Image (spheres, helix red, strand yellow):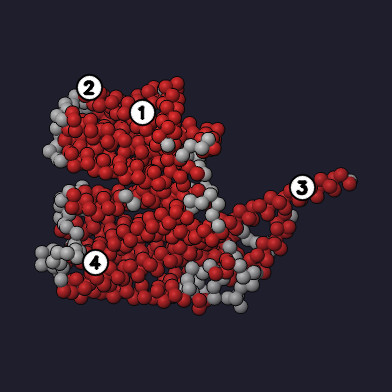
Amino acid sequence: MWRDAWLIFRKDLMIERRARITLTQIVPTVLLILVVFAFAFDANASLLGAGAGGLYWVALLFGGVLGAKRSFDIEAEGGNLDALRMGGLEPAAVLCGKAAALAVQLAVIGTATVAGLLILYSVTVDDWLLLVVAAVTGTAAFAVCATLYGAMTVGLRSADTLLPLLLIPVAAPVLLAGTRAFDVALGNSADQGWSWTALLAVVLVTYIAVGWAAAGPLLEDA
Amino acid sequence: MTDAGTIISGYGLTFAAVAGYAAWVLLRGRALGHRLGIGQMTPDSAPPVERPDEGAGGTERGPHGPQLARTVGCSVTGPDPDSRTDPSQP
Amino acid sequence: MPATAAEPDLRSSKNSPSPIAGAAMTGTIATRVLGVVALAAAVVMALLALWVSPPERVQGDAVRFMYLHLPSIWVAYGAFVLTAAASARLLWLSRATSPSGRAERSIRRLDRTAGAASELGVLFTALTLVTGSLWGNLTWGTYWQWDARLTTTVLLFVTYLGYLALRRLPAEPRQRARRAAVMALIAVVNLPIVHYSVNWWRTLHQEASLSLTSDREITGEMYWTLMYSLAAVTVIALWLGVHRYRVLRLEDLAEEDAIAHLLQERRAESADRVRSDESAVTR
């Protein structure tokens, strides 16, 4: 099981290393979102700083939708999923490997976004530990969720438009909790940052459990 | 708006929404029944709760049936769908 | 004419007492009785809630929204739980690579149950949000508060809108049923979050109004009106659900019918072509 997951994980990252879709297309898109938001708020530094925590997660959300779509596009071509199944790989292992690979790519996107926020929005970080823990937990939860929904829509004709509609509402708890935790970490609010991070962890564990149970039926005849 | 007005409009909105959904479900059931050439209802077999929309096609089912099927654009079974037996037709 | 070749076959299948005949209408005697009960219950509920029950000490007449708001969310929760239960059972039954005919039929039934229930859930969640914001406007002075409970309820609403969108997409029925079932299980994760969020993050929203353990604050006529409304709205929702289920069944049949019709048309067309080819050869 873990060996299979590791294989898929390495395969996905190797494809990314060759194609560099995340690095050359998704990361610039996400940075573009930060610039566009500055237009929306008329480059008002205090407004931008106050909304920075939420902007991080909004940007990551859109990057994640693109990433999840890409992650399953490479499987939809040429009946790759069928081949993986014929090869005797466990469905749960396939999803696990893909989620891990997506999480790594999302982490790259997230790091670039934080850098963008620090430079473009001139935010300061009060609590790095909270920021990093919340970011890692939230990113992992979102990656698992996005992988599940990517598998759910793979092969559907309108997957491009359906995926964001399905993913954004379900990922909203991640967005909400992540934003609140980031607001605390960035010193924008006195909320209970760690409670919201705990919620992120609860969501992560729940998605993993559901994904574990759902992998078989999702991939069996995808 | 006054308190009473808000409350009345809230209740009105809710009951209208539920009634609208019910009407949609029942009418869709009838349309699909026609489309499949089944569910030719005699006037007295119509479900009692849908009285409000009875005028929309409850009693004079026969002549409308094939036309409805044609406008829905589906399985009219033969070149002459009117020849199907219909209990509500005189 | 291609249609003539298809005619006799289809027609005989129409007139025979096939399983289709059972779904002839979406009403049966039982549901008609249920429908009358539901209608009467709704009228009585309006009378009780708007006229018989007294105004509350603090909120005044605004409390009358409670008799709409709480039953709505109760039905919505119930519908989503039913959706999840049917989905879980569906996934359990479809473990086998080639399910038996009986399991196959249960799977279709469970899929329709989930479809009908989720639609009702979306309707009643929408009603909860509307009545809640009107109520909120009277008691809090604002239509909307961004507190945890309201926010998670609106999320629940859009999540299931997405679920309905996934169900609408054309796909192979078995696959669609499974994918929708998986999504329903993920979406139901939101239910406990909505329910307990009021305890996790205590904000403006009042505590859950009904509690079995603590002393109840709603007493007397108000309490009984609320209990009655819960029962009445449940009956109405049941009636709606049964009919929606049957319409979904008709939709499935219509889909099969359309496919069969297309197939027959194609067959007739190719037979026609063969015939004209033959006549060309003899000529």
Labels 2 and 3 within one chain: no
Labels 2 and 4 within one chain: no
Q: Looking at the image, is mark 2 or mark 3 nearer the viewer?
A: 2
Residue positioned most to the left: C57
Q: Amino acid at mark 1?
A: Gln
Residue B8 lies, with reference to residue B72, above or below; the image says: below
Q: Which x, y percent locates residue C134?
A: 22, 58
Q: Which x, y percent locates residue C150?
A: 23, 51
Which residue is pictured at 46% across the width and 47% down the height? A217
Quick one: A105 or A43, which is closer to the camera? A105
Q: Amino acid at mark 4?
A: Tyr
Residue B8 lies, with reference to residue C133, above or below; the image says: below
- Residue for badge 4: C67
- Helix, strand or loop at mark 4: helix
- Helix, strand or loop at mark 1: helix
Q: Looking at the image, is mark 1 or mark 2 nearer the viewer?
A: 1
Q: Looking at the image, is mark 4 or mark 1 nearer the viewer?
A: 1
Give the Cα separation between the discs numbered 3 and 1: 56 Å
- Residue for badge 1: A105
Give the Cα separation between the discs numbered 2 and 3: 71 Å
Quick one: A196 or C236, which is closer to the camera? A196
- Helix, strand or loop at mark 2: helix
Q: Which x, y percent locates residue A48?
A: 20, 30
Image disc number at residue C104: none
- Tell me the crowding category of disc 3: few under 14, some 14 to 19, or many 20 or more residues within 10 angstroms, Cα based: few
Labels 1 and 2 within one chain: yes
- Residue for badge 3: C273
- Tell me the crowding category of disc 4: few under 14, some 14 to 19, or many 20 or more residues within 10 angstroms, Cα based: many
Q: Chain of mark 2?
A: A
Q: Earlier in the sequence, mark 1 or mark 2?
A: 1
